[in-house]
Image (cartoon, rainbow, N blue to C red):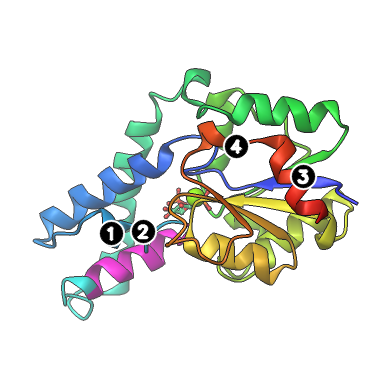
């Protein structure tokens, strides 16, 4: 029996995934590394330091920096990202999300957030959603990032529900893997090809249908 929905933040509730992309792209260009949106798919849901590492590997520059230099590169990206997210208001909640949250609430189901972003609380507060969720699990509470299921399992545990009674919603390949690894039903936001492991995929949040999701979950 369905008891909870657990959402990813960046790219699902709001378009902050775009801000991560812009901030990484600016840093990469300074380093003479170019990357496109296809490569950016590999950064979604991946922690800050791991994302930096992937970018440096892409440019063949992974051995050129000390850990301290890497930390300051990551801090530079985060400063830029911090400036970009200052623009976020409740108007930036993606289409289809507010009605879906309302449906979930009206059925007395629990709501959790599973984001590896250390900026998750700030973004949720700017969206006016911080108090809508029963639990927010971010990078500070977990040891292993996505695709490890830990973040989704921790959210379920804090909500007091079994993983099999949860539906996870994600836009990242590693995020869908984490949901499936946790033994939950996975709803993907993006391309069916990229998110092939999800149980149900919507091209964008505006297409999300509570009735359809629950029907598929019950099957
Ligand atoms: P920060 P999510 C993830 O958030 C993003 O998808 C990913 O692009 C980002 O690198 C990661 O958070 C860390 O974010 O640098 O703010 O700590 O998708 O799990 O909500
Ligand atoms: Mg995401």
In the rendered image, residue 85, in percent from the top left (x then y), is placed at 40, 32
Q: In the picture shown, does residue 211 fall above or below 213?
A: above
Going from the N terminus, do you reach mark 3 or mark 1 first? 1
Q: Earlier in the sequence, mark 4 or mark 2?
A: 2
Foreground: disc 1 or disc 4: 4
Q: Position of residue 151 (x, y in %)?
A: 66, 60
The dot on residue 38 is 1
CB of mark 1 within 8 Å of CB of mark 2? yes
Residue 68 seen anywhere in this rendered image of the structure:
no
The total number of labels drawn is: 4
Local secondary structure at mark 1? helix
Position of residue 118 in the picture relative to residue 185 (left or right): left
Residues shaded magenta: 45-57
Q: Which mark is residue 208?
A: 4
Q: Is residue 158 visible?
A: yes
**Residue marked by disc 2:** 41
Place residue 211 in its image quadrant. top right
User: Where is residue 71 shown, x and y percent of the image?
Assistant: 33, 62
Q: Between 136 and 105, which is closer to the camera in this rendering? A: 105
Residue at the far bottom in the pictured view: 63
Tag 2 secondary structure: loop
Residue, disc 3? 214
Check the picture and name the quadrant holding the C terminus: bottom right
Dominant secondary structure, magenta: helix
**Which tag, 1 or 4, sits closer to the chain's start?**
1
Give the class, few, some or many, for how many residues have Cα within 10 Å of label 3's Cα (few <14, many ≥20): few
């Amino acid at each position: 029996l369905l008891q909870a929905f657990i959402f990813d933040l960046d790219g699902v509730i709001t378009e902050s995934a775009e801000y991560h992309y812009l901030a990484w792209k600016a840093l990469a260009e300074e380093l003479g590394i170019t990357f496109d949106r296809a490569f950016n798919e590999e950064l979604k849901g991946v922690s800050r330091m791991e994302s930096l590492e992937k970018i440096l590997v892409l440019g063949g520059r992974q051995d050129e920096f000390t850990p301290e230099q890497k930390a300051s590169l990551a801090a530079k990206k985060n400063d830029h990202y911090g400036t970009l997210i200052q623009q976020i208001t409740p108007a930036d909640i993606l289409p289809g999300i507010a009605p879906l949250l309302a449906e979930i609430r009206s059925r007395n189901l629990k709501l959790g957030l599973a984001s590896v972003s250390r900026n998750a609380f700030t973004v949720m507060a700017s969206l006016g959603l911080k108090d809508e969720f029963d639990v927010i699990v971010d990078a500070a509470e977990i040891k292993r990032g996505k695709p490890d299921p830990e973040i989704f399992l921790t959210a379920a545990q804090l909500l007091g529900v079994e993983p099999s009674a949860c539906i996870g919603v994600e836009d990242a390949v590693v995020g869908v893997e984490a949901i499936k690894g946790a033994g939950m039903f996975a709803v993907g936001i993006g391309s069916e090809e990229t998110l092939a492991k999800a149980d149900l995929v919507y091209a964008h949040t505006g297409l999300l249908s509570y009735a359809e999701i629950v029907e598929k979950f019950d099957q």
